[in-house]
């Protein structure tokens, strides 16, 4: 569907056309008319589906009609990176509108405090905030949320995972009941439904491709011993010079350092990012990666959700992520909005059951490719059989001797 069929303001249409959006994505087609009609929304949509525009365009449409200077929209997100990224998108969408937005998030040097508190009392229309920092401002008593008409909770499942449930309810107690509330979540566990039942009024529910990687991601996995992981990714990266933007996820900060060191030693352009870095350093590292000055970024899962870096060619899960949903989020960094990409996971002998759960969630069997022969055999891929009376786990065995059929095409 074209955007001009959705009933959006001309100035918004002009802005998104400059941004190169041609047709609405599925989630945009579903939610935009309902949000324009003033409904509350509960939407299951993952990063990469265009969900930011799905809630932001109709809100901006409302604000363009209202034409006032009130602080009327509050967007609550789990991480500072997502706050920055949503704010950047808002600036693009509202380029031809007289609308301002400000981010509120922790981890900066403190110089931002005055600007944030000013924005929270007067002078801006939209706040994009992480819960913790917002609560710090609320505690000081000057925050005025009495004109809020649109409230968005983005990546609500992630916020509950981080432990923001009480903070969210506390923030909501400052916001008028007479408001439109839009809740977006990548997954829909019971705790999200419970929160939705508490804060949404007669919501319209939408769901797009629940917990499955975006179409266009080519997924594959190596079954390896831990000490084969670095050699495997080294050879993968060296053999694919055409892939100019590679994101590697690892489970610990220690491993991030080790991977960066090894890849650097092999002559690669690589940087690491983890919560150890100051906010400013994190932004600088991300900027160099975004602008392709750094070819490979190695990250702990700080980055795995919500970060919008365009056109990553290859995602490597150095470790199988702890939750199946995290896999979907990580893989969501590639093949965003109609593009294609590759996601490779490294599965060691301890992570096979975990990987099996991922395959069940995405309802897809991921291609297992052989460890390059010079690195020796990998472990045999075996999934534990279902326990009697327990949940069915399915019985599968993908390879013999850790070496799947040679005929498999190697996607990377
Ligand atoms: P999101 O899921 O909101 O993180 O968006 C993923 C990426 O897709 C962002 O870079 C958006 O700018 C881009 N995007 C969103 N909607 C569209 C669209 N309709 N056409 C092209 N790109 C889009």
Image: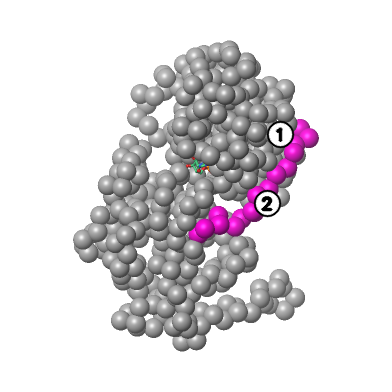
Q: First in sequence, mark 2 or 1: give its number.
A: 1
Q: Mark 1: is the Cβ under 8 angstroms from ligand 1? A: no
The residues tagged by marks 2 and 1 sit, at their Cα atoms, a distance apart of 23 Å
Secondary structure beneath disc 2? loop
The image quadrant of residue 280 is: top left
The image quadrant of residue 409 is: bottom left
Secondary structure beneath disc 1? helix
Q: How is the image coloured?
A: one colour
Left or right: 57 as drawn, with respect to 222: right
How many C-alpha atoms fall within 10 Å of the one at disc 1: few (<14), some, or many (≥20)?
some
Q: Position of residue 366 (x, y in %)?
A: 53, 70
Return the residue at label 1. Answer: 34
In the rendered image, is residue 51 in sight? no
Q: Residue at x 56, y 46 (%)?
A: 49
Q: Disc number at residue 16?
A: none
In the rendered image, is residue 388 in sight? yes
**Is most of the magenta stretch helix, strand or loop?**
loop
Single out the residue that lies furthest toward the bottom. Answer: 401
Q: Residue at x 52, y 14 (%)?
A: 122
Query: In this view of the protein, which residue sits in the foreground, 282 or 246?
Result: 246
């Amino acid at each position: 569907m074209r955007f001009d069929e959705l009933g959006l303001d001309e100035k918004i249409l002009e802005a998104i056309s400059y941004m190169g959006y041609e047709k609405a994505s599925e989630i945009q087609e579903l939610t935009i008319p309902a949000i324009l009609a003033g409904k509350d929304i509960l939407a299951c949509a993952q990063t990469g589906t265009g969900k930011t525009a799905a809630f932001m365009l109709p809100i901006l449409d409302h604000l363009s009609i209202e034409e006032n200077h009130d602080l009327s929209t509050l967007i609550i997100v789990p991480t500072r990176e997502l706050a920055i990224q949503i704010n950047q998108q808002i600036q693009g969408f509202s380029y031809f509108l007289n609308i301002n937005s400000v981010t509120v998030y922790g981890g900066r040097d403190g110089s931002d405090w005055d600007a944030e508190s000013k924005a929270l009392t007067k002078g801006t229309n939209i706040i994009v905030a992480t819960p913790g920092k917002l609560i710090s401002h609320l505690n000081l008593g000057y925050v005025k949320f009495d004109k809020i008409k649109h409230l968005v909770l983005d990546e609500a499942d992630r916020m509950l995972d981080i432990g923001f449930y009480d903070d969210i309810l506390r923030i909501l107690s400052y916001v008028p009941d007479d408001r439109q509330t839009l809740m977006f979540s990548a997954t829909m566990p019971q705790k999200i439904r419970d929160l939705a039942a508490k804060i949404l009024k007669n919501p319209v529910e939408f769901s797009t491709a629940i917990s499955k990687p975006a179409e266009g991601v080519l997924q594959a996995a190596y079954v390896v011993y831990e000490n084969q992981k670095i050699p495997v990714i080294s050879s993968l990266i060296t053999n694919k010079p055409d892939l100019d933007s590679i994101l590697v996820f690892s489970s610990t900060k220690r491993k991030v350092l080790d991977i960066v060191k090894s890849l650097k030693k092999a002559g690669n352009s690589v940087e690491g990012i983890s919560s150890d870095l100051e906010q400013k350093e994190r932004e600088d590292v991300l900027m160099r990666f975004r602008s392709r000055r750094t070819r490979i970024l190695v990250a702990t899962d700080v980055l795995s959700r919500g970060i919008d870096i365009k056109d990553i060619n290859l995602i490597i899960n150095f470790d199988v992520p702890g939750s199946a949903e995290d896999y979907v989020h990580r893989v969501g960094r590639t093949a965003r909005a109609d593009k294609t990409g590759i996601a490779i996971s490294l599965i060691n002998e301890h992570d096979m059951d975990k990987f099996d759960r991922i395959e069940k969630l995405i309802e897809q069997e991921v291609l297992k490719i052989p460890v390059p022969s010079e690195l020796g055999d990998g472990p045999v891929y075996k999934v534990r059989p279902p326990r009697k009376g327990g949940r069915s786990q399915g019985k599968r065995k993908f390879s013999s001797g850790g070496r799947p059929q040679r005929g498999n095409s190697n996607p990377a």
